[in-house]
Structure formats: structure tokens, C-alpha cells
Amino acid sequence: MASASAETASSSSQIATAAASPTTERRGIPAAQFVEDVQTFLSQLDLDVNSALAFLQERLQQYKLVEMKLLAQQRDLQAKIPDIEKCLDIVATLQAKKEEGEALTADFEVSEGIFSRARIEDTDSVCLWLGANVMLEYSCDEATVLLQKNLENAKASLEVLIADLQFLRDQVTITQVTVARVYNWDVHQRRIRQAAAAAANES
Amino acid sequence: MQHEQAEKSDTVVTWEDQQNINKFSKLNNRFHELEDEIKFAKETNDNLEDAGNELILTDEDIVRFQIGEVFAHVPREEVETRIEEMKEVNSKTLEKLEKEKETVLAQMNELKKILYGKFRDSINLEED
């Protein structure tokens, strides 16, 4: 009896892995195993229904945590991209003004609600804030190149992040469906047992 | 964020079904994201319209136009041109988003037909 179920378990696990998602994990996120048959799934894990449900719920919590983290990263990137585009816009405007030979007058914020006027004449170079209390001076062309590169990197990172989030959501959906199926299987089993017990009592 | 539940009574859930459910979930998320983006694009459109109207009403020659964090002094005509360009870009974006939203909705309806066909009452694919 034990060896027979072990055989079915191993063959069904082969089927399960063959039919399951091609990756077992992605950047630290474990993939959710797709369950072909609840019975074999439970015997494969060697857990009773409640422990299996607890295990799946715990997985869901872990997924939620990772999702929060990824969403926060996505928000940061989505805020950074318009910032870089604004910087590119200013550098382009300065270069255009330089070609016209005019000085650029601008009102800028000194403090909240207080503005001051500035006249920008020498527009050969700009200073870029690189973070970590570091600011470097660049020529307009170099600045444009650097900002473009940053913009492209940010957009590429965002794409990877979105793909990660999609993978994660798939795993969450698979796990939720598995939870529902295990629960329903259990309800089904109880009904069968009750029917069998009732039939035994009658006879 | 789960608005769909699949309860199997005696129906078997195949890998293909699971993939359909996953795809529906992805499409639904994308649909909500698109709605937010469309709302934002429409607001930007309104703002640009208002800015254009204000520009017509003002009789100043030099307008303070916001570039990044500063307000550059820009001649009125250049501001007009800039606003027109921004409106163009924005309406193109809005159009693209609306189209994508329609595609997503169409795909979602297709999937709904397939999944309801297989699972009938065991699955709920509507918003809460």
C-alpha cells in the first residue's frame, strides 16, 4: 500500500513538474506548484488537509510581503522617470537659448512660497545631482548623454520589475486556486464519509 | 486583491484552466492600471486646455512657463507652441490608452466565456 502510493506520488510529481510552470523560482520568489490532483498532492506533501491549508496560507503571506516590496520599488521608479525627463527638458532649453545667444531668465523657488529671479547667461555647463551629496559639473552635451542613459536604465528596470510582479501575481492566483480546491476536496471527502457512515448505520 | 474565486466541486482544474485564470487576473490588473492612467491623461488634457485659454486671455508678452522646478521667462508665442505640442503628445497617449483598454476588455470577455463555460457557478469573475 505504501509503495504503491509512493509510486503514484513520484509519477504524479513528474507529471506535475512537467505540467507546472517552467521556472521553479524567479529572483528569489518560489514558484507555486500547480496541483493536478488534490489526493496525490496531499500524499506527496504527506500532510493532512489542515496542515496543507496552513502551508498554503503561509505561502500566500510570503507572496504578499514580496508584492508590497516590489510595488514600493515600482512607485519609486515611476516617480523617478518624469524627474529625469524634466531635467532633460531643462538642459535642452538651456542649449536652445545658448544657440540664440540670449540669457535665460527664470523664477525659482528659494523657499516654500518664496521665489527669486535668476538670469542664466553662461550655459556651457550644468551641474547634475548624482545623489549621496555629490554634484558634478558637466557640459550640456555630456549632461544630455548621462541623463538619457539614466532614463533608459530606469525604464528597463521598471520593465523587469513589472515582469516580476506579473510572475508573482500568477503564483498568488495558483496558490489561491489550490487552497479552494483542497478545501472543497476535504468537504467532498467528509460528505462521502458521512454518506458511508449513514449507510453503515442503516444496514 | 482577489475578486475571482474558483471553487471546484467535481470539475477538474487543468493547467490550461489555471493559465486562463492567471491570464484573466493579469488582464484585470492591467485594466485597472489603464483606468488610472486614462484618468491622469484626461486631467493633463484639461490642464493644458485651461493653460491655453489663460494664455489667450493674458496680454503679457513674457509668460512664466514651468520647466522642471523653475519658471522660465518665455515669449508668449513659444509658450503657445509648446502647449500645442504637449496637447498633441497627450492626446496621442490618451488614444493609445483607450485602444489598449478596449483590447483588454475584449480579451477579458473572451476568457469569461471560456471559464464560465467550463466552471459555470463554481467561478466568480465579477468585481466585488
Image (cartoon, rainbow, N blue to C red):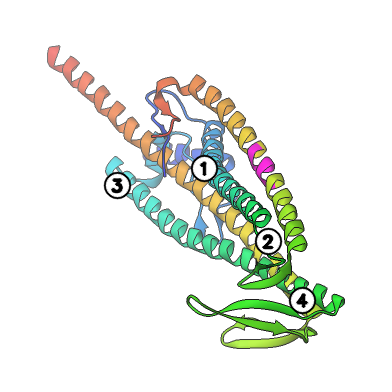
Near-viewer residue (B124 or B85): B85
Q: Residues within 10 Å of mark 3 (few under 14, many from 20)?
A: few
| Left or right: A201 in relation to B6 | left
**Stretch in magenta:** B93-98
Q: Which mark is residue A94?
A: 4
- The residue pinned by badge 1 equals B32
Distance from the alpha carbon under mark 4 to that under mark 1: 39 Å
Image coordinates for residue B87, horizontal then vertical, percent: 70, 50
- The residue pinned by badge 3 equals A51
Task: Name the image quarter holding the C terminus of chain A.
Answer: top left
Host chain of mark 1? B
Query: Which residue occupies the extreme left position in the image?
Result: A201
Amino acid type shown at disc 2: Asp
- The residue pinned by badge 2 equals B59
Near-viewer residue (A182 or A149): A149
Host chain of mark 3? A
Q: Earlier in the sequence, mark 2 or mark 1?
A: 1
Q: Residues within 10 Å of mark 2 (few under 14, many from 20)?
A: few
Distance from the alpha carbon under mark 3 to that under mark 1: 35 Å
Kindly indicate whether the residues beneath marks 3 and 1 are on one polypeptide chain.
no
Q: Secondary structure at mark 3?
A: helix
Query: Where is residue B111, by image quadrant?
Result: top right
Q: Residue at x 50, y 38 (%)?
A: A12
Distance from the alpha carbon under mark 4 to that under mark 2: 26 Å
Near-viewer residue (A187 or B41): B41
